Amino acid sequence: MKYLLILLLFVSHLSLSQSLPSSELQIKTAVLAAPEAEKSIATVMGYSSLNGKLQVIRKGTGEMICLTDDPNKDGFSVSCYHKDLESFMARGRVLKAQGMTTQQIFDKREEEVKAGSLIMPEDPATLYVLTASKENYDINTGNVTDTYLRYVIYIPYATVASTGLPLTPEAPGMPWIMDPGTHRAHIMITPTKD
């Protein structure tokens, strides 16, 4: 039984490493979500064939941190966010790895921000998320077609009153505020799809 377990772990590790694109292709696709001026200088976090954990695969000098597509999730999704959001994002990844639900993660981070142990940016900070269906992503070349880019601007503890934004978009592509009055208050901008 022990040897069967070791064999299964080896095979699952082998299949993960075989399904991962190279670091170069991970970088190529991760920065697709970044503003043009940040693409060549952003820090990029990706996956290693050795352990399957998110790690820095390119240390950048810019303002953005980009995450490559998670090979264990359906579809294609990469994101880039301002480096001042890293503590918030990293804490979310740790809590998720501990098995917390989305609501538990929200509550824990809210508690930690209020206690001063988790620091949120003082100024607005942006997250860019670029998605596509898995069929439109070629893992061998890093080419992605028919993508969709949405924007999130974090403004901790902002409200409808402080921003003048509604709680839901009142027109296609209109900005709106989500989680107002909390550490995770953010402006959502979801452009219409062609």
Image (cartoon, rainbow, N blue to C red):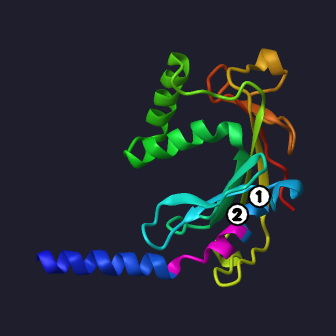
Q: Would residue 51 appear left or right of 119 to someone viewing this image? A: left
Q: Amino acid at mark 2?
A: Ala
Q: Are marks 2 and 1 in contact (CB under 8 Å)?
A: yes
- Badge 2: how crowded within 10 Å, few (<14), some, or many (20+)? many
**Judging from the image, what secondary structure is the residue with disc 2 in?**
helix
Who's the residue at 73% across and 27% down the image? 155
Q: Quadrant of residue 7?
A: bottom left
Q: Is residue 81 above or below residue 73?
A: above
Q: Is residue 191 above or below residue 113?
A: below
How far apart are the alpha carbons under marks 2 and 1? 6 Å
> What residue is shown with label 2?
30
The magenta segment is 19-27
Who's the residue at 66% across and 78% down the image? 135
Q: Position of residue 32 (x, y in %)?
A: 78, 63
Q: Amino acid at mark 1?
A: Ala
> What residue is shown with label 1?
33
Residue 132 appears in the figure: no
Q: Quadrant of residue 164?
A: top right
Q: Would residue 106 appear left or right of 169 to someone viewing this image? A: left
Q: Is residue 155 above or below residue 94?
A: above
Q: Position of residue 138 (x, y in %)?
A: 68, 81
Q: Quadrant of the N terminus?
A: bottom left
Q: Is residue 61 above or below residue 153?
A: below
Q: Nearer the viewer, residue 134 or 32?
A: 32
Q: Position of residue 29 (x, y in %)?
A: 72, 68
Q: Quadrant of residue 122?
A: top right
**Judging from the image, what secondary structure is the residue with disc 1 in?**
helix
Q: Is residue 142 magenta?
A: no
Is most of the magenta stretch helix, strand or loop? helix
Q: Position of residue 14 (x, y in %)?
A: 40, 81
